[in-house]
Image (cartoon, helix red, strand yellow):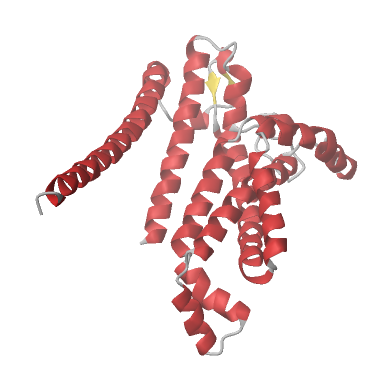
Amino acid sequence: MTLLKPNILFQFNREQAFVWGLRSLAVLSGAIVLLIFGFLLWEAMPLLNKIGLPRFFHDASWHPTSQEFNLSPMLWGTMLVMFGAVSLATPLGILSAVFMQYYASPMIAQIYRRLIELLAGIPSVVYGFWGLVVLVPLIGKLHPPGASLLAGILILTLMILPTIALVAEASFANVPSAYLRGAVALGLGRWAMIRGVIFPAAKSGLITGVILETGRAIGETMAVLMVCGNVVQVPNNLFAPVRTLTANIALEMAYAVDDHRAALFVSGLVLMALILGLVAIAEVIRE
């Protein structure tokens, strides 16, 4: 008994240290987010105090050197590119996960999984370069100029599809096997089991995958900068060029000064507001 006490005490201390380590990392993560938000607000506040927030959505256009700060066209561009990509990538990614987990043979599933992992590891600038030299000319043959909202949607779809596919597959793999045995015992077919049992059981993981892919779609910069045309306008069709908020920051931050620079930090605040709204919506859906 006396030999066991030191071991129990050591194990207890190690577990306590691990718990406090996790708590410290959680606090650190939250502090980093707050610091980023505080920095953006600090840099944007002089201009917000000077002209107010409404002008960023009601001005005639985006010409910061002429004191015109309308972010609406770029906000619409960001939302349309994101919504189009997520609308395409989500069903394709979930069905890819279904194929890997429930229809493909082990060898085919492994090869397919490796291909998706390879897609996830390709740098965004490579996607953008491929889109610029291959996809944009193809779209240009259908409807000039080629660099357009459609090109951005297709490139982003390829980029975020691995995220939802891999998260969805992990969610399906974690569904208790008792659920599957129960569905088979009830005489359900494979698709009926997937639709009626697997999808509801994996709902939380699927929502997490959608949040992750949407966050990446909102924040992507280089690829959309290379293929979307970067024209500050609200697109009236899929073939119209657009500029996103992230591309606008990347293009103009190098030479922006004074009010122009502060306006770009307001763009960053708008992007953070989009992410916060996304997280809030996801929490509501989870409940």
Residue 23 vs residue 264, the one in the foreground: 23
Residue 267 is situated, as x and y percent measured from the top left of the image, at 50, 28
User: Quick one: quadrant of the C terminus?
Assistant: bottom left
Residue drawn at 22 percent across, 46 percent down: 11
Asked if one can make out residue 228 in the rendered structure from this viewpoint, the answer is no
Compared across the picture, whether 245 is left or right of 133 comes to: left
Horizontal and vertical percent for residue 252?
A: 60, 18
Whether residue 82 is visible: yes
- Where 118 falls versus 130 (above or below)? below
The part of the image, by quadrant, that contains residue 24 is top left
**Residue placed at 70% from the left, 43% from the top?**
236
- Where in the figure is residue 34, as x and y percent of width and height? 33, 30
Q: Nearer the viewer, residue 259 or 159?
A: 159
Q: Position of residue 219 (x, y in %)?
A: 55, 36
Whether residue 171 is situated above or below residue 126 in the rendered picture: below
Quick one: which residue is furthest to the right in this view? Answer: 141
Q: Quadrant of the N terminus?
A: bottom left
- Report whether 32 appears left or right of 83: left
Q: Quadrant of residue 151?
A: top right
Residue at x-position 62% and y-position 70%: 102
Number of numbered labels in the structure image = 0
- Residue 254 in the image: above or below residue 150: above
